[in-house]
Image (cartoon, rainbow, N blue to C red):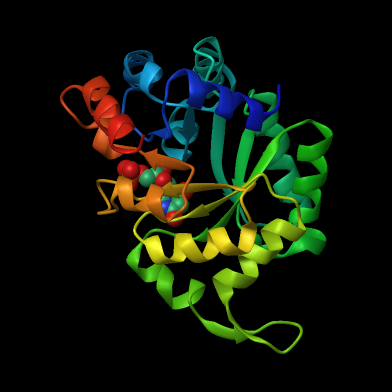
Amino acid sequence: MTFEEMIRRASETNRSRIVLALDLEDPDPDALLERSSRILRESGEYVCAVKINRQLVLALGLRNGVDKLVKFAHELALPSIMDAKLNDVGHTNEFMLRSYIDAGFDAVIASPLVGWEGGLDSVFGLAKSKGKAVILLVYMSNPGADALYSLRTMSAMGKPTQVFELLAEMAVEWKANGVIVGATKPEIISRVRQLVGREMAIFSPGVGAQGGDARSAVESGSDYLIVGRSIYTDPIPSAAAKRYRDMAL
Ligand code: BMP
């Protein structure tokens, strides 16, 4: 099953648009794996995917660490996204992606700022050959993101445009499987939706802890909301996951 089929199916079954960002920290790797697994087990029925970031990869490693969580997510019928933000030259990107695929991931996040040739060409090539998905950063959720992503520039055709609009067009041209636009920027979500069309999935992080509003992100065109701290720091993470699930129905 492709990533797109897996997330759509999990989203329908659990009636959820929530991607759980498991960014827990703990100096003890065993305790970290245990806590991460527990949150995933308890919240699994309220989410449609799990996203893993460097907090777990650096602390647990991929083999015999993060791969166990990916396997557990699959047992819960949830796809897993590696938030690698791939942004290097081709051979390094390709090495990283191969390692994540070997650990069982279904999708990877990459930055289009590195460009196609000798940048993301190898990422898309490897991902497609292995049936994996690539999700591109189009507009980040943090306040400082405006400086670059909103920059006014010219398209190759000499038309005035903004950097994020070019990135959204690249995502279409490169046949990305999804784009990331911060939930903190509902008006940007609407504009990206116009540019990428109905079929491309929009993932929006920044709900809750970063101030983004679940409802307005969905109303602006987001398909999936990425939520981390507002779920896993809650005294009852499953209740928080259910709350965000219900907010974004
Ligand atoms: P939180 O809900 O705790 O703010 O976490 C958001 C998650 O989404 C983090 O894993 C972060 O790396 C990721 N993210 C983000 O916050 N903004 C972006 O623009 C892109 C991201 O991947």
Residue 217 left/right relative to 242:
right
Q: Residue furthest top?
A: 75
Q: In which quarter of the image is the N terminus?
A: top right
Residue 84 seen in the figure: yes
Q: Position of residue 131 (x, y in %)?
A: 77, 31
- Place residue 121 in its image quadrant: bottom right
Q: Which residue is drawn at 63% across and 56% down?
A: 197
Q: Which residue is drawn at 47% across and 38% down?
A: 53
Q: Position of residue 196 (x, y in %)?
A: 63, 58
Q: Judge by depth and name the residue closer to the eye, 209 or 185.
A: 185
Residue 210 left/right relative to 105:
left
- Place residue 138 in its image quadrant: bottom right
Q: Quadrant of the C terminus?
A: top left
Residue 48 left/right relative to 248:
right
**Location of residue 220 with respect to 47 vertically, above or below:** below
- Place residue 9 in its image quadrant: top right
**Location of residue 191 with respect to 159 vertically, above or below:** above
